[in-house]
């Protein structure tokens, strides 16, 4: 998926929010914004939002000297999600279709996203699980592919959301390779975030080799690309991964919440839709 003009002010706003996490010095913040503003016109307009985001967050890290500005927030939201784990596990196990409920839970977890300019209430989102339908719902295809696959490649999105992914992984009862980012970018999950969520108890964890807020195959490691091309089933979580992989072919299933107008318009769905594509 290519970037839209609407993405550009969003990137500047993300840079502003991220800079303010660690400094109140307006001059330092403006310096970071100036650097980002100068870099954006140089990026190919055909690039995906994930590729542009990679450059934006590289500048923020370079100019601020802070490699993982969301580290503390990632820990806070992982802990909050872990506190909800027993409730969610019970919700899944007592439902009429535990696998489908686990899919819904995993999608709802995608709300934990600090790249999007919106507030969220995790408990409220969970309360709506039983009432909000999936606007695009390819569950039958998902279920059929899962039954045939001997191993699943599961591409992670955000820290905290990792706990919701763990619940789906446990319900699928198939070997899973869980793919995280190579380096910190926004609140996307890296190895330590996945381990903190207990993913290592349910799946093998690897890095895609990517330091962008989304999976772009041309930026991935050779090991991951080979695994991707040979995969029998691929689960891709979140908007960033959709932006990077929507043009790829393969046994791909996108699980996400449409949290911004660009994604909603791209998919022709209402803002806030839960999607299994």
Image: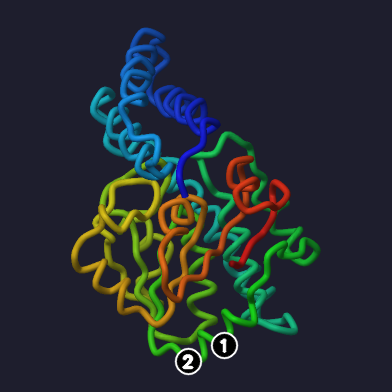
Q: Residue at x 62, y 50 (%)?
A: 258
Q: Residue at x 30, y 26 (%)?
A: 42
* Above or below, comparing residue 171 to residue 155 in the picture: below
Front in this rendered view, residue 46 or 79? 46
Residue 243 position within the rendered picture, expressed as x and y whole percent measured from the top left: 46, 51
226 vs 254, left or right, is: left
143 vs 229, left or right, is: right
Disc 2 + disc 1, Cβ < 8 Å? yes
Front in this rendered view, residue 199 or 60? 60
Label 2 sits on residue: 148
Instruction: Please state, as top left, top right, bottom left or bottom right, where the C terminus lies in the image.
Output: bottom right
Quadrant assignment, res 150: bottom left
**How many angstroms separate mark 2 from mark 1 (CA)?**
7 Å
Q: Mark 1: few, some, or many residues within 10 Å (few <14, many ≥20)?
A: few
Q: Residue at x 47, y 92 (%)?
A: 148
Label 1 sits on residue: 144
* Above or below, comparing residue 269 to residue 53 in the picture: below
16 vs 6, left or right, is: left
- Label 2: state its secondary structure: helix
* Above or below, comparing residue 44 to residue 221 in the picture: above
Outermost residue, right side: 131
Residue 2 position within the rendered picture, expressed as x and y whole percent measured from the top left: 45, 44
Residue 26 position within the rendered picture, expressed as x and y whole percent measured from the top left: 41, 9
Outermost residue, left side: 222
Residue 75 position within the rendered picture, expressed as x and y whole percent measured from the top left: 43, 48
- Label 1: state its secondary structure: helix
Q: Residue at x 51, y 85 (%)?
A: 146
Q: Mark 2: few, some, or many residues within 10 Å (few <14, many ≥20)?
A: few
């Amino acid at each position: 998926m290519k970037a839209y003009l609407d993405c550009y002010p969003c990137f500047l706003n993300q840079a502003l929010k991220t800079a303010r996490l660690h400094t109140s010095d307006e001059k330092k913040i403006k310096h970071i914004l100036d650097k980002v503003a100068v870099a954006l016109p140089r990026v190919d307009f055909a690039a995906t939002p994930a590729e542009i985001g990679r450059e934006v967050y590289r500048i923020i890290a370079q100019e601020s000297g802070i490699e993982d500005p969301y580290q503390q927030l990632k820990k806070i939201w992982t802990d909050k999600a872990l506190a909800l784990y027993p409730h969610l596990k019970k919700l899944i196990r007592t439902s009429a279709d535990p696998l489908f409920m686990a899919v819904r839970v995993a999608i709802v977890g995608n709300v934990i996203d600090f790249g999007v300019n919106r507030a969220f209430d995790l408990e409220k989102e969970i309360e709506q699980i039983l009432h909000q339908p999936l606007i695009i719902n390819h569950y039958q295809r998902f279920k059929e592919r899962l039954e045939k696959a001997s191993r699943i490649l599961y591409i992670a999105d955000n820290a905290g959301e990792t706990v919701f992914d763990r619940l789906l992984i446990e319900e699928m009862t198939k070997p899973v390779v869980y793919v995280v980012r190579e380096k910190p970018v926004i609140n996307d999950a890296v190895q330590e975030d996945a381990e903190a969520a207990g993913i290592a108890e349910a799946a093998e964890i690897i890095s895609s080799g990517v330091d962008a807020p989304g999976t772009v195959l041309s930026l991935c490691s050779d090991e991951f690309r080979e695994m991707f091309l040979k995969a029998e089933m691929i689960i891709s979580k979140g908007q960033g991964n959709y932006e990077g992989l929507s043009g790829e072919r393969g046994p791909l299933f996108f699980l996400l919440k449409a949290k911004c107008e660009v994604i909603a318009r791209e998919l022709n769905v209402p803002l806030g839709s839960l999607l299994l594509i």
